[in-house]
Image (cartoon, rainbow, N blue to C red):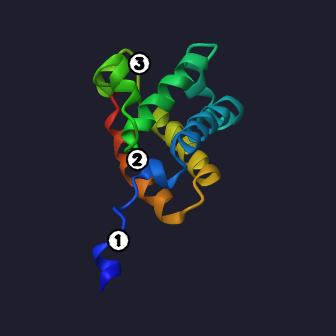
Amino acid sequence: MLDKLFKKKPKSAYEAIGGEQGTQKLANTFYDIMETDEFAAELLALHPKPMDSIRQKFFEYLSGWLGGPPLYEAQYGHPRLRARHLPFEVSDNMVEQWLYCMNKALNEVVEDDNAREAIRQPITQLARHMKNS
């Protein structure tokens, strides 16, 4: 009975994947895959080089999106993701390449099956929402 009263609040996805360190690893693994996997060559070509800045911004975005500190918003304001992606042609092919990299990164970085699947569904919806062509 008492254990029900003192149960911990459910973890955020940010906490479930290891907080700052896990989120940084997820962001970097995503870009490592994009840079090395031929399947994502077209997606990679759209990104400015070097990618240090974009890696950092992605980490900051993921931090807040996963329920951790809202680092991106604190520095840049609301992400307005769809508006920020409008200058680029985001086709079904680009979405699939992005999801391919993210799913591989999730499989590699997030050990907890429940946390991984809890992230996979909404990030898939978010990626598909970016489509603009």
Q: Secondary structure at mark 3?
A: loop
Residue sitting farthest toward the right: 36
Label 2, on which residue?
A: 124
Q: Secondary structure at mark 1?
A: loop
Q: Residues within 10 Å of mark 3 (few under 14, many from 20)?
A: few
Figure check: 112 above or below 55? below
Displayed quadrant of residue 97 = top right
How many numbered marks are there? 3
* Label 3 close to label 1 by CB (< 8 Å): no
Q: Position of residue 43 (x, y in %)?
A: 55, 27
Give the residue type at disc 2.
Thr
Give the distance between the C-alpha atoms of the residues marked 3 and 2, in whole angstroms: 19 Å
First reached walking from the N terminus: tag 2 or tag 1: 1
Give the residue type at disc 3.
Phe
Mark 3 or 1: the one toward you = 1
Q: Which residue is painted at 60% across and 59% down in the image?
A: 111
Q: Position of residue 24 (x, y in %)?
A: 57, 36
Mark 2 or 1: the one toward you = 1
Q: Which residue is painted at 30% across and 78% down in the image?
A: 4
Mark 3 or 2: the one toward you = 2
Q: Residues within 10 Å of mark 2 (few under 14, many from 20)?
A: some
Label 1, on which residue?
A: 7
Give the distance between the C-alpha atoms of the residues marked 3 and 1, in whole angstroms: 46 Å
Figure check: 40 above or below 48? below
Q: Which mark is residue 104?
A: none
* Label 2 close to label 1 by CB (< 8 Å): no
Q: Secondary structure at mark 2?
A: helix
Give the distance between the C-alpha atoms of the residues marked 2 and 1, in whole angstroms: 31 Å
Label 3, on which residue?
A: 88
Please tell me which residue lies in front, 30 or 92: 30
First reached walking from the N terminus: tag 3 or tag 1: 1
